[in-house]
Image (cartoon, grey):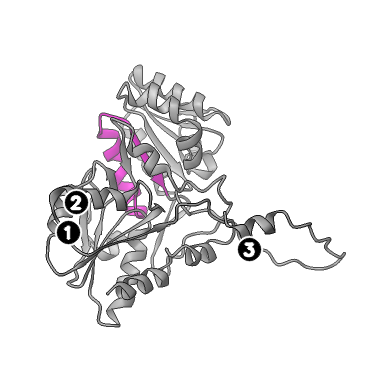
């Protein structure tokens, strides 16, 4: 939070004269995805299909089923759904118990509550025991304008340091839908970010044969001038920025890395080692401890040293407001991504 935002926070409230209309900004908005088709609740629908095929699958919610799309499972199979209330520590502990009894639990909440509030319970009850609990969390990074209480800008850094934990940051509806079965097949614990509601379908447009695979990064767009290594919805933004930059004669490749841990170091080193390209990481996460630093350490340890830059959120508590304004402010909008890349060339 900046000094300016703190000053605004403690300003006296203005009394609104009777009858005066007040303009407000939407605090939570859908991601700008112009030109893309959308899928409604891809996680919820994919989980129902999985549950039909696998009787071990159950869902748990910390009073947020509607906001993590788990209400789809609750409506279709109420006997397989557990409403745990606003008690994330209890929810993940119960999920651990269910996993020990042979169930395949998918536990959902907001990313801030899993990473900050329930971390010790996840570490001790799930990760240390290497149990197959899948923790799927909405509002990752800067996908809400509600301010630091709801913006999980450091969740990847928190979970990257946890042994046995696999971490997924899906780009779109395609990634989410395909990742559900992959998570179920994975024998250990997983933390996955989640985009919910009407989610754009991006990857199928750019790479029709795309198939999500845990631990695998894939080149979605080729380019000779710049390589952007991205995760989450920043892959969508990177692809759109690449299109914008192509009009200025800048040829940008995009390597999508939906798995943050384990990182596909082989593909990253191969693509970054193709000489002459500026390498840029792009993530919806603080520049501390996320994809950018994971890629940087991978390159340094291997002795691969291209020109390297990072696009991500700053190491600070972010402001509240409308998402388009915040994404411009913090440099993760399409226009700002293109502007930064152009400035580095």
The residue under label 3 is 25
Decide: is 237 above or below 71. Answer: below
Decide: is 11 above or below 34. Answer: above
Q: CA distance from mark 2 to mark 1?
A: 7 Å
Mark number, residue 258: none
Taking the magenta stretch, the answer to whether it contains residue 177 is yes
Quadrant of residue 180 within the rendered picture? top left
Mark 1, other Cα within 10 Å: few <14 / some 14–19 / many ≥20: some
Counting from the top left corner in percent of width and height, residue 120 is at 44, 26
The reply to whether residue 200 is visible in this rendering is no
The residue under label 2 is 300
What secondary structure is marked by label 2?
helix
Q: CA distance from mark 1 to mark 3?
A: 44 Å
Query: Residue at the location (48% across, 67% down)?
Result: 328
Chain part drawn in magenta = 170-194
Q: CA distance from mark 2 to mark 3?
A: 43 Å
The residue under label 1 is 305
Decide: is 281 above or below 167. Answer: below
The reply to whether residue 266 is visible in this rendering is yes
Quadrant of residue 331 within the rendered picture? bottom left
Which residue of the protein is positioned furthest toward the top in this rendering?
A: 101
């Amino acid at each position: 939070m900046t000094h300016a935002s703190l000053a605004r926070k403690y300003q006296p409230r203005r009394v609104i004269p009777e009858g005066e209309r007040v303009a407000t900004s939407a605090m939570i908005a859908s991601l700008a995805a112009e030109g893309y088709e959308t899928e409604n609740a891809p996680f919820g629908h994919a989980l129902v299909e999985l549950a039909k095929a696998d009787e071990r699958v159950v869902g748990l919610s910390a009073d947020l089923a509607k906001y993590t799309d788990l209400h789809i499972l609750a409506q279709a199979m109420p006997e397989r759904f557990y409403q745990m209330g606003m008690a994330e520590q209890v929810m993940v502990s119960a999920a651990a118990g269910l996993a020990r009894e042979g169930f395949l639990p998918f536990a959902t909440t907001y990313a801030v509550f899993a990473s900050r509030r329930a971390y010790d319970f996840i570490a001790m009850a799930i990760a240390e025991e290497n149990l197959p609990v899948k923790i799927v969390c909405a509002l990752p990074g800067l996908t809400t304008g509600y301010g630091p209480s709801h913006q999980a800008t450091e969740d990847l850094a928190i979970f990257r340091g946890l042994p046995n934990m696999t971490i997924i940051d899906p780009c779109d509806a395609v990634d989410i839908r395909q990742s559900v079965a992959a998570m179920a097949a994975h024998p250990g614990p997983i933390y996955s970010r989640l985009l919910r509601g009407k989610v754009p379908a991006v990857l199928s447009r750019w790479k029709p044969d795309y198939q999500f695979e845990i631990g695998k990064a894939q080149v979605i767009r080729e380019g000779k001038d710049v390589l952007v290594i991205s995760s989450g919805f920043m892959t969508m933004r990177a692809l759109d920025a690449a299109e914008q930059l192509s009009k200025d004669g800048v040829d940008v490749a995009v390597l999508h890395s939906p798995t943050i841990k384990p990182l596909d170091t082989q593909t990253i080193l191969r693509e970054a080692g193709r000489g002459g390209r500026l390498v840029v990481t792009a993530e919806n996460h603080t520049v501390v401890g996320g994809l950018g630093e994971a890629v940087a350490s991978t390159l340094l340890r291997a002795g691969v040293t291209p020109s390297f830059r990072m696009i991500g959120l700053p190491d600070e508590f972010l402001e509240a407001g409308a998402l388009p304004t915040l994404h411009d402010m913090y440099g993760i909008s399409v226009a700002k991504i293109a502007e930064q890349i152009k400035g580095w060339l």
